[in-house]
Image (spheres, rainbow, N blue to C red):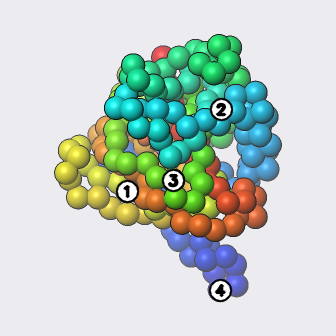
Amino acid sequence: MDDLFGDMTATLPKRQELAAGAILLRGCALPHEGVVLAALQDIAASAPFRRMNTPGGFQMSVAMTNCGDAGWVTDRSGYRYDANDPVSGKPWPAMPDVFRELAMSAAREGGYPDFVPDACLINRYEPGARMSLHQDKDERNFTNPIVSVSLGLPATFQFGGARRNDPVEKIVLHHGDVVVWGGPSRLYYHGILTLKDGEHAQTGRARFNLTFRKAL
Ligand code: MD6
Ligand code: FE
């Protein structure tokens, strides 16, 4: 019944290996969507979303904020983690317990039982925003995985390989999907295609992505 009359994501497999060490857990965050979105609003009230500049001088189309002991930032001087929000000069908002618990339980399910995040980068995509192919390599220790939680409008994730020119696989990430990603593919190139317009019951015309890291 559910598969026939539920939403269309109900027929997707619950667990899918994207590459060695990268596991997609469909709908893993759905039981927590309400508390997570409420906590996200509180974070954005004290550390508002902003479009940062790349070292090359371009303004990103994705708006970002952070919570936790360190936040990812970029400006003309480069990419880095900083304990303080450069806009306010104050520490980033603390990581809510529900964030940490969600990230740790997904990591456990994905095969990383020792993961404890200290940083959470929050991306907000509005229609037209995109993220070009990149590697996540500003963390100190690549033996830790990254846990990525998608909320709101669906987006097409591009997942490549160790080299920028490697072929990319495309996977649509839906509201509530979680990717746990470490091990051999930790430094693989990936990106998000231009967000299509739409309206989501929980987030309106936006997609949010939370990436939990052990940065320090
Ligand atoms: C996004 N995600 O889903 C962008 N990075 O909006 C990422 O760049 C990402 O999902 C590292 C690990 C998992 C991710
Ligand atoms: Fe990334």
Q: Which of the two discs, 4 and 3, sits closer to the camera?
A: 3
Give the mark nearest the N terminus, 4 or 2.
4
Image quarter of residue 41:
top right
Which amino acid is tagged 3? Ala
Q: Report the residue marked by disc 4.
A: 4
Give the mark nearest the N terminus, 3 or 2.
2
Which amino acid is tagged 4? Leu
Which amino acid is tagged 1? Gln
Q: Report the residue marked by disc 2.
A: 100
Q: Is residue 32 left or right of residue 158?
A: right
CA distance for labels 4 and 3: 33 Å
Q: What element carries label 3?
A: loop
Is the residue indicated by label 4 positioned so its CB lies within 8 Å of ligand 1?
A: no
Which numbered marker is on residue 43?
A: none
Q: Which of the two discs, 2 and 1, sits closer to the camera?
A: 1
Q: What element carries label 1?
A: strand
Residue drawn at x 47%, y 38% as measured from the top left: 59
- Along the line of sight, the residue nearer the viewer: 44 or 142: 44
In contact (CB < 8 Å): disc 2 and disc 1: no
Estimate the x, y position of residue 1 in percent, counting from the top left: 70, 84
Q: Report the residue marked by disc 3.
A: 129
Which amino acid is tagged 2? Arg
Question: Is residue 69 visible in this depiction of the protein?
Answer: no
Give the mark nearest the N terminus, 4 or 3.
4
Q: Report the residue marked by disc 1.
A: 158
